[in-house]
Every structure is written in C-alpha cells, then in structure tokens.
Image (spheres, rainbow, N blue to C red):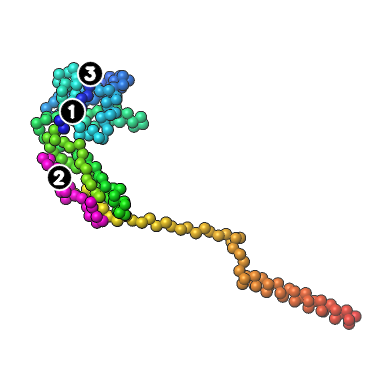
Amino acid sequence: MANFIKIKTFTRDAGRQQSRATRIDKRVPAVVYGPKTDNKIFSISIQDSIKYSASRYNNEIFELQSEDKQLNSLKVLCKSTSIHPTKRDPLHMDFYALNMKENITVDLTLIFEGLEELQKNNLEANIAHKSISIECSPADIPESVIIDLSVLSAGSSFTVEQLNLKGIKILTDLSTTLASVAEKKEEIEEVVSEAVSPADTPASADAKTSDEKKEAPSENKASDNKKDGNEQGKKS
C-alpha cells in the first residue's frame, strides 16, 4: 500500500458536552493511540467518518492531516467505530498509530468467488470463515484475498494452508477449513391434502341400501294392517 488515504482532522476539547457540540457541528469525535504515541483526541467530518468506517477500509492506512504537529502525517488504521443504534450514524472512531518499520497483526478479509459456477453444477458452498489473522509490515497489508471455489468438487474443501501469501505470516491454524463444497440438496415439496367435510362426502351404495332396508319393514307393516282391516270388514 504505497498510497495513503488522507483524512483532515479538527481540534476538539475533551468531555461529554464537548463531544455533543462536535456532533452538532457535523463532525465525529475521534482518538488515536499506539505503543509509541500518546493518546490524542480530534474530530473528522461526518462525511469522512461514514465513508471510511465501511468494512472495505478495515486495513487501509490513513494519513492524518492536522495543524497539530504530533498528528500531522501520522499513519493510522481505523480500529473501531461506535454507531448510533437507531440513526446508524458514526458516534466515535478509534485509530491506531502505526510504526511503518514494525510488523502489525490484522484480520485479513476473504472474498469467495465462483459461487454461481457451483450452482450451475448443482453444488453449493459452505463458508466457514470470512477472515484470517496475519502479521506483516503495514505497507504490505493486502486489501483482501480472493478465493475461487469453482475449481472445487463435491466433498472437497479449501484450507488456510492453500493460501499463497508471500511475505506475510499467517497466524491462523493452517489446517483450518475456510470453505467446503457439497452436492446441492433437492428441496422436496410436501403435498398437503385438503380435508373433506362429511357433508361433501357422497353417501355410499351400502349406506343407501341399508337405509332402504330400514324403510322396507314399515311399508310391509302398512300393507299387513290394510289386509287385517279388510278382513275385519268382511266379518262384520
């Protein structure tokens, strides 16, 4: 990283009330610290704070521009940003002062490619880790590492040991699996049958016959009663 991103800084006073006043002025309170640097407070514009607090700038080296001689031209990394819980605006930023001649430990972002190609071959990737820990000179910090998963087959995986990072010491265990590939599982759709109410169910032939049988004795009984009435009429 030969080119450093320049950030303009502004002086500010310490204290909660002063921090609130700084935010009202559309600036974000910040602090820089390091093993060989005394803690120094300052502020930066809200625009710079929003832009450079994004994850893509995690390992970018910034060069402070300040009227303070101790801050001016200082090379720093953004270590953390406090975000408002609802507005999502930056509230405070912490910067780490670098010694460009000494190695530093950082988390290196991993970018996985070839996912669409895997899907075309009915495969899917399981991403286990999105970053690894490394140690190197500040000037040699990679922005990110791209890993192509399209070359993997079902049942294979990609480990830390397979990374090719020259001049960089990898602190993460080399046997750590970063991603694996497996055959895509087919989704089975469940067919739910609709419940049929008894009223919608047609009467069976057996049920109909049974009803007819129940009605038959009544008809025979009425016929017998008619015959008995005629015989009694003749006798009289």
User: In the displayed structure, does residue 113 sit left or right of residue 205?
Assistant: left
Of the numbered discs 1 and 2, the one sitting upstream in the chain is 1
Residue 108: say if magenta: no
Outermost residue, right side: 236
Near-viewer residue (210 or 129): 129
On the image, the x and y values in percent for residue 212 come to 68, 72
The quarter holding residue 147 reads top left
Element type at marker 3?
loop
User: Would you name the residue on which mark 1 appears?
Assistant: 4
**83 vs 130: above or below:** above
Magenta stretch: helix, strand or loop mostly: loop
Of the numbered discs 2 and 3, the one sitting upstream in the chain is 3
Quadrant in the picture for the C terminus: bottom right
- Whether residue 88 is visible, yes or no, is yes
Local packing at callout 2 (Cα closer than 10 Å; few below 14, some 14-19, many 20+) is: few
Using the numbered discs, state the Cα–Cα distance from disc 1 to disc 2 in whole angstroms: 25 Å
Q: Which amino acid does label 1 sit on?
A: Phe
What is the magenta range?
151-175
- Kindly identify which numbered label has been placed on residue 11: 3
Total marks placed:
3
* Whether label 3 touches label 1, CB < 8 Å: no
- Whether residue 104 is visible, yes or no, is no
User: In the displayed structure, does residue 154 sit left or right of residue 172?
Assistant: right
Quadrant in the picture for the N terminus: top left
On the image, the x and y values in percent for residue 188 come to 39, 57
Element type at marker 1?
loop
- Kindly identify which numbered label has been placed on residue 164: 2
The quarter holding residue 234 reads bottom right
